[in-house]
Image (cartoon, rainbow, N blue to C red):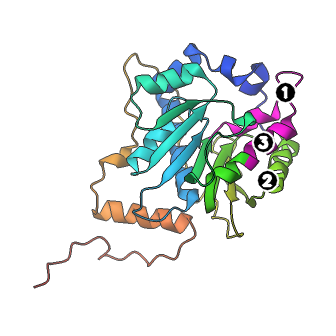
Amino acid sequence: MAFCSKRPEHGGPPELFYDKNEARKYVRNSRMIDVQTKMAGRALELLYLPEGQPCYLLDIGCGSGLSGDYLSDEGHYWVGLDISPAMLDAALDRDTEGDLLLGDMGQGIPFKPGSFDGCISISAIQWLCNANKKSDIPAKRLYCFFSSLYSVLVHGARAVLQLYPENSEQLELITTQATKAGFTGGVVVDFPNSAKAKKFYLCLFSGPSTFLPKALNENNDEEEARESEFTSERVPYRMARRGIVRKSREWVLEKKARRRRQGKEVRPDTPYTGRKRKPRF
């Protein structure tokens, strides 16, 4: 497993690393915004939620609310938890629609049992594998997190946690503690042969074991590498596909492609796909 040697979690605790300067990047850096939004979209796909039904979701490590924006765009309601005051301030400045909570996921998730229909997390869980003080024991903090997460989810719900494991041992530590907490599931690795596009998604089930969704590979549309751009103006946070007209042919084709990636059975595309039908008398 090859990973980048320069890792944010090696520089200190997250509440210090994600200061005002770092939070500003999540508001002005178009490349960072695009990557975060795409990972949130992929995590939502892997949640396998009922089509057309708004759900109440938990966003762990919500940061400036980029992933929450995507959830709102898809018609869901959400609560975000983050340990960085600066990142939450940035989310408030952006008028995100979700509720925000300052807290340490390693100390547990403070909600009633069965509160959420699902959970996503983008680039946060690996922070629990580092001890920033003597009292921090990664295995115990991970177990506290996963056991409380298992409790706050509706039975049978899923959690999809995108992460950047430092090595295979760290990934094993994370999955072991998730299993001890009662979860089943596995790891979906998108673009496994790509150094830049490779992404890890820990897919957890709070109920009977079910199938793991298919991973994306180089045969699918892979994101193109491009340089970061900074601007003093706010960048639109919605993906380009937000401009697609609902119920149009493009909208239908994208929806069918998303369901195929989720492992669902979908009828083949035809020249008549998405065509408007005449009203019946």
User: Regarding mark 2 in the picture, which secondary structure is present there?
Assistant: loop
Nearer to the camera, 131 or 279: 131
Q: Which amino acid, by three-letter code, is at mark 2?
A: Ala
In the figure, residue 250 lies in which quadrant? bottom left
User: Regarding mark 3 in the picture, which secondary structure is present there?
Assistant: helix
Look at mark 3 in the image and give the residue it sits on: 144
Look at mark 2 in the image and give the residue it sits on: 181
Q: Which amino acid, by three-letter code, is at mark 3?
A: Cys
Q: Give the range drawn in magenta.
A: 122-147
- The numbered mark at residue 131 is 1
Residue that protrudes farthest toward the left in the picture: 281
Nearer to the camera, 25 or 52: 52
Residue drawn at the location 42% of the way across and 22% of the way down: 93
Disc 2, disc 3: CB below 8 Å? Answer: no
User: Regarding mark 1 in the picture, which secondary structure is present there?
Assistant: loop
Q: Quadrant of the C terminus?
A: bottom left
How dense is the environment of label 3, judged by Cα within 10 Å: few (below 14), some, or many (20 and up)? some
Specify whether 183 is left or right of 152: right
